[in-house]
Image (cartoon, coloured by chain):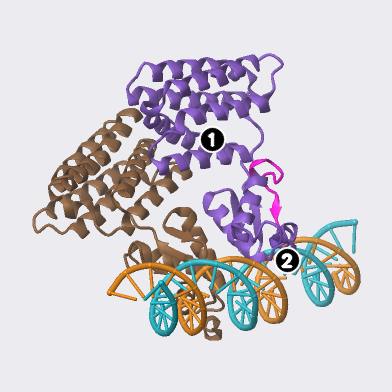
Chain colours: A purple, B brown, C cyan, D orange
Amino acid sequence: MSDKTSAAGSQTVSKSERAYAAVKGRIVDGSYSPGYRLVLAKIAQDLGVSVVPVREAIRRLEAEGLVKFERNVGATVFGIDPTEYLYTMQTLSIVEGAATALSAPLIGAPDIARARAVNAEMRECLQDFDPDRFTRLNETFHGILFEHCPNPHILDLVHRGWNRLASLRTSTFRFVPRRARESVQEHEMLLRLIESGASADEIEKAARLHRSATLDAYLAQSNS
Amino acid sequence: MSDKTSAAGSQTVSKSERAYAAVKGRIVDGSYSPGYRLVLAKIAQDLGVSVVPVREAIRRLEAEGLVKFERNVGATVFGIDPTEYLYTMQTLSIVEGAATALSAPLIGAPDIARARAVNAEMRECLQDFDPDRFTRLNETFHGILFEHCPNPHILDLVHRGWNRLASLRTSTFRFVPRRARESVQEHEMLLRLIESGASADEIEKAARLHRSATLDAYLAQSNS
DNA sequence: GAGATAGTTTTCGTATACGATATCGTACTC
DNA sequence: GAGTACGATATCGTATACGAAAACTATCTC
């Protein structure tokens, strides 16, 4: 423990914070998959800290909905069953739609160009389809659209939604590759709407539908 | 400490949980007003527990946005300045609108009747205007409309929004009593929309506008 | 052989202790 | 008299320790 603070001159963030970031990171990147049992002592040991900061980190993740906590039993990574997926996507469709609409007036030509470039990459990605890469690009694309949202609360909700989805590795596009092609087209339509200065309502509706359609594609697939 | 578990046969919930409920309760009911400094040791003493469970509780409240936490400085009740109020109301208008729309098809005649009764009370409340009572009734009214929302995530977001508003005691209606009268009328219109089986889109828009209008009234007031 | 029970192990929940950090007050200097 | 440096105090951050609950295992009985 003493070696930690030697070179860089003492830690700049608390261990609790580090534990939070570490666990969250591993959930989002898939090292801890849904249902994974988060044993406090083990995590503490891995990070070289005591259990107390780890507990605090877990509590925060619990409040964010990434972790399920059961008294005297322990914490597990929140499993996303199909129902949860539905709820999360629906919620995301609403908050992301709103965020995108609020963000739209603040999106400049450079942003549009960047988004279009990302979408072009996605289009290329369609042959030799790589779901993971496609999903990452998709996140980047939408990030450009909603990141200017001036309301930090809404933005936070969008990020939390995306995190929840990230924690389940199984991108929709892996299941429903057909949807990827439509998605790219809808992206272009979204960009044109924004460019043309469409009303907030139109943009919100389009963004929401775009996500709902992905959800519907998933549902149609899983029911067949 | 040992006397606690004597009669009722051991605590049914953890101290951490109790601390969470206690602190949250005091924030929402106004005992701890915005900016209030939450000193861990003092709270722990008040509740008859050690600081560890209190810290966990505070962490959860932090993740919920009710508490602001600063490293090596401490926790304070999240102050809601006008900007925060705006953000919170805007977010609530979006998620509550969605929740109400999703809830609408599940609202039965008894619910409608109950809501109408509450609204009648609100109407009576208009003379001898009591802002606090009016605000409580208002919460009950909207609760009836959105509580059937089948998506628990969205419902949770709505509750969090209301909690945030509760933490600032100053109801809008105290500042803008004029708005109360309009509000009652809009409630009736909302009920008719739901009764008539209007489309989800219509209901969502109406519910959202209802809240936005309250926000606008507040803004108009504070700028004059 | 199947089910129940007692014992063992793991893991959690909380208290206490102590070092670290920020804040506040006081004295000292220019 | 104003500003700065130093010290005291309050409060936080984390480690360790120990009791309690749950989960697992092995044995015993029918």
Name the chain under label 1. Answer: A
Give the SS element for disc 1: helix
The quarter of the picture where residue A206 lies is top left
Q: Residues within 10 Å of mark 2 (few under 14, many from 20)?
A: few
Residue denoted by label 2 = A2
Query: Is the residue under label 1 in contact with that under label 2 (CB below 8 Å)?
Result: no
Check if mark 2 and mark 1 are on a common chain.
yes
Q: How many marks?
A: 2
Q: Is residue B13 visible?
A: no
Callout 1 amino acid? Leu
Residue A88 lies, in percent from the top left, at: 52, 38
Residue denoted by label 1 = A86
Residue B181 lies, in percent from the top left, at: 13, 46
Residue A201 lies, in percent from the top left, at: 33, 25
A26 with respect to B108 (left or right): right
| Relative vertical location of residue B148 with respect to residue C3 in this rendering, above or below | above
Over which residues does the magenta segment extend? A28-39
Q: Quadrant location of the C terminus of chain B?
A: top left
